[in-house]
Image (cartoon, rainbow, N blue to C red):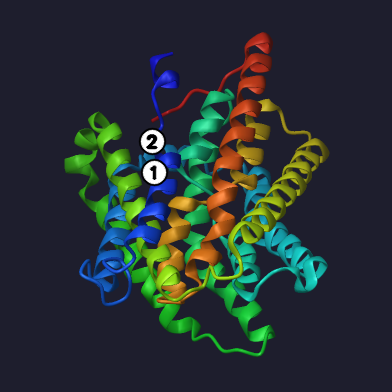
Amino acid sequence: MANRSRFDWFLPGMAAAVALAWLFPDPGAHGGSLHPELLNKLGVALIFFLHGVALPFAALKNGTLRWRLHLVVQASTFLLFPLLGLALLWMAGGWLSPELRLGFFFLCALPSTVSSSVAMTAAARGNVPAAVFNATLSSLLGVVLTPLWIGALVTAGGQSMPLGPVILDLVQWLILPLVAGQLVRPWFGAVAGRNKGRINAVDRATILLLVYTSFCDSVKGGVWTGHGAGAVLLALAGSALLFVLVLAATTAACDALGFELPDRAAAVFCGSKKTLVSGVPMARLIFGAHPGLSLILLPIMLYHPLQLVVCGALAGRWAKRGAEAGGMVPDPA
């Protein structure tokens, strides 16, 4: 109960990072005193190295057998989401700026979350090993599929995007640190397990630094001139609509396949979530010093708290239902 009442500083921290970028954009902008060109990549590497150290391989192995569940999650993440995103962009027409259009599709092309998907599944008495497997598989697939989807959208708009260097950059700064973390896990895994709170704090603080530098360039470049509250409201409405549609689709798929509550929880929570933790670093690597990066990140920054609030309420309801039924899948980690 103490953990539930503990203040969560991450969402207020995002607001503070954006405010700091408005007040002091020079240090975090391209060529600034914080040297964001190098600092951002080192921050990305640190995040994924810590993920590798903390990730229990046994939980991955135990979650591999539910292939129908895996198919629902990955199809939702990398097929349903992008197709809904294309439909949303078509319906929006000229209502959205080019940066916000790209931001919505970037949200749709992102992989699922790892930590919150697993945490929500556990809270709902769901299939935790399957959630760990799917969330991790989604992160690995996203290194290739996310830039491929973005490249397809950009190319369809008459522009070019060199996918080879982008994917190579993602492998270098995301996958290699993740693998390095797994390799040192036999020596540092127990230490990481005892210090989950500190690792999570470092992880979140690094994300806030990336949010700050992402907004610094756009503030200096005047990207927000003429957008302001209108862009935020459009991004919020689009994110909410997208979330409702995906939640309904994943629930319908679970009904059609006859999933019991543990598998349903894993499928819905992994299949409807999008990662801010990986999304901000990936945006920095894919879009580089794009002056509209803050607008590109806006949909995922709004989608993140929305998915936490709704899925948290859903997890509580399912946990109560699971307790009444007497069923629970334990976490093997």
Crowd rating for badge 2 (residues with CA inside 10 Å; few <14, some 14–19, many 20+): few
Left or right: where 30 falls relative to 19: left
Q: Tell me which residue sits at (51%, 72%) in the image.
A: 223
Q: Position of residue 40 (x, y in %)?
A: 30, 65
The numbered dot on residue 9 is 2
How far apart in space, not on screen, are marks 1 and 2 (Cα)?
A: 6 Å
* Residue 290 placement (x, y as % from top left): 46, 77
As rendered, which of 127 and 192 lies closer to the eye?
Answer: 192
Quarter of the rendering containing residue 174: bottom left
Q: Examine the rendering and report whether any part of residue 111 can be seen.
A: yes
Q: Quadrant of the N terminus?
A: top left
8 sits to left or right of 196:
right
> Do the residues bearing badges 1 and 2 touch, measured as CB atoms within 8 Å?
yes
Kindly identify the residue that appears in the image at 68 percent across and 16 percent down: 321
Give the structural element (helix, strand or loop) at label 1. helix
Q: Is residue 143 above or below residue 30?
A: above
Residue at 53% x, 54% y is 138
Residue 317 image offset from top left, x and y in percent: 66, 20
Q: Secondary structure at mark 2?
A: loop
- Quadrant assignment for the C terminus: top left
The amino acid type found where label 1 is placed reads: Gly
Q: Which mark is residue 13?
A: 1
- Identity of the residue drawn at 57% across and 19% down: 328
Residue type at mark 2 is Trp
- Position of 133 with respect to 321 (left or right) is left
